[in-house]
Image (cartoon, helix red, strand yellow):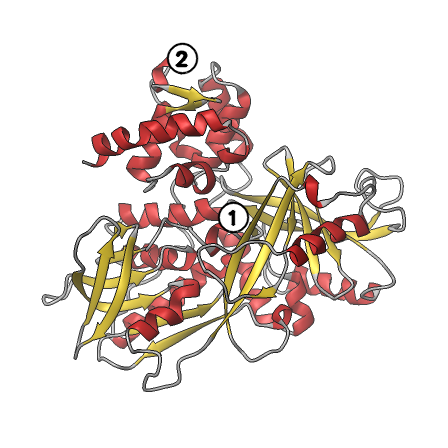
Amino acid sequence: MCMSKTDYDLCVIGGGINGTGIARDAAMRGLSVLLVEAKDLAQATSSSSTKLIHGGLRYLEFYEFKLVRESLREREALLKIAPHIIWPMQFVLPYSPQQRPYWMIRLGLFLYDNLARRDLLDGSKGLQLIGTGLGVPLDDRYKKGFSYTDCWVDDSRLTVLNAVDAAEKGAEILTRTACQKIIPHRDYWEIKIKGENDQEVRTVTAGMVVNAAGPWTRKLLEQSGLDKGMKPVPKIRLVKGSHIIIPRAFEGDQAYILQQKDGRIVFFIPYEGDYTLIGTTEEDYDGDLYEPRISDDELKYLVDAYNTHFKGEIAAKDVLWAYSGIRPLFDDGDSESRTVTRDFVLHQHLESRAPMISVFGGKLTTYRVLAEQTLNKLLLAQSRREVCRTAFNPLPGGEFGPLQFGALLDEYKSQYPWLPEEVVERYARAYGTRTDRFLRGAKAPEDLGKHYGDWVFEAEIVYLIKYEFAREVEDIFFRRSKLGLHVSEETMEAVGKALPKLKKDLLG
């Protein structure tokens, strides 16, 4: 379907969740696609979220009914196509009469339950917290509250799996390849790209372009002279969100959502079995986009949030790890970062007859519908009508029914009894039905190749390099997995030493 004078039908710039989602949708519609990403997939914002697929309960307070409805619809759609990396989680919302009124919370939860059809997840309900397990970790002033259900997601794996599926549908995925400039021509686009090991800039051409570079969206337009187009180009508001990880703070699989004095909310979420994740903050940002760091004020804010609502206290020294991400929000001119819309804007550039769209804003939960609307706009400009199928086709490894993960796990435990159950569960959660791709035929740990330590085997590393675009130690231990929180330095060093030869053997 590629135009005769261009290399690709579509070039997507940016390997975050929006870019990979767009590439997947386009490839499934039969377009020839190139995706370029300056670093690794999910290098920035898409691996630094609160890791939730949710409707956004707090957005109701700002009358964002359309965004919440769309997010609730997507919540169930994504649970169906990726049940290995997305699963339901109960959220407990304690009630405090000093904050939002009881009736307001009850009304908000009623809307949350009913704004969109709900087939798989439980609705909200009132709770008594005193004398119950759910109330044990909380300060004694909390007598009652509410619960509702949203979904947890491995955000970086969601991004990677969209790229994997796009590649399997024919897309070319180039990581560590920066787009330096986009040049409009009468009916096509010229794109200048340079890989980190390339000596010279390369030129590719495409009939359509999507600029989904996240925090770098405006920078790329400015480099290309496209920031002052035939119609006003939106601005981006960069808002930093930081999270901290502490040793497991409470028993159970439930998460807590707590209201703060400033009107914000903070989540307290079970994380990787041994930990509790606390976040997020909202702070305007103008620093290095690749190296955002938690500030002292943010650290104090999150530590104080825990100490305000839970029994016992933590201090900064109890924080094991912190991470920060930059949200590239559509700048609607609002003075408060917490009230800036999380909805997306698709800006169509008119410098060429060939279509180009820049993506502004958006949130993890709505990436799929963002991609669908982007492709619909691009193809409409060319009078084409290919149908979107991303809501129905499972992501790689998700070829089993929603809420059926337990059955899949039992099958793998029976099939591979020589592996510790926690290792089998990690494989099943990360790879779903694709676990067999590197375990099939193995009868003992020795069949999985070199053991680098902590039950990390060569077979898995080979799979990640060959199929999931992993190239460096950080790709493997912090984006394709969260093993970096669990394994020893020696294990990571052993994998690092093995990587050059593995990459040479597998990639040439």
- In x, y percent, where is residue 470? 34, 40
Camera-near label (2 vs 1) is: 2
Q: Residues within 10 Å of mark 1 (few under 14, many from 20)?
A: many
- In x, y percent, where is residue 107? 76, 66
- Tell me the amino acid under the disc marked 1: Leu
- Callout 2: SS: loop
> Are the two marked residues, 2 and 1, in contact with CB atoms closer than 8 angstroms?
no
Using the image, determine if residue 461 lies above or below residue 299.
above
Q: Is residue 64 visible?
A: no
**Which quadrant of the figure contains the N terminus?**
bottom left
- In x, y percent, where is residue 501? 25, 29
Q: Is residue 175 left or right of residue 420?
A: left
- In x, y percent, where is residue 290? 44, 56
In the image shown, does 503 or 438 lie closer to the viewer? 503
| Residue behind mark 2 | 444
- Callout 1: SS: helix
What residue appears at the point 80 percent right and 41 percent down from the top-left corner? 137
In the image shown, does 242 or 433 lie closer to the viewer? 242
| Residue behind mark 1 | 79
What residue appears at the point 51 percent right and 44 percent down from the top-left corner? 154
**Which quadrant of the figure contains the C terminus?**
top left
User: Closer to the N terminus: mark 2 or mark 1?
Assistant: 1
Tell me, for residue 325, which label it has, or none: none
In the image shown, does 116 or 153 lie closer to the viewer? 153
- In whole angstroms, how far apart are the C-alphas of marks 2 and 1? 33 Å
Q: Is residue 351 left or right of residue 416?
A: left
The quarter holding residue 317 reads top right
Q: Residues within 10 Å of mark 2 (few under 14, many from 20)?
A: few
Q: Is residue 151 visible?
A: yes
- Tell me the amino acid under the disc marked 2: Ala
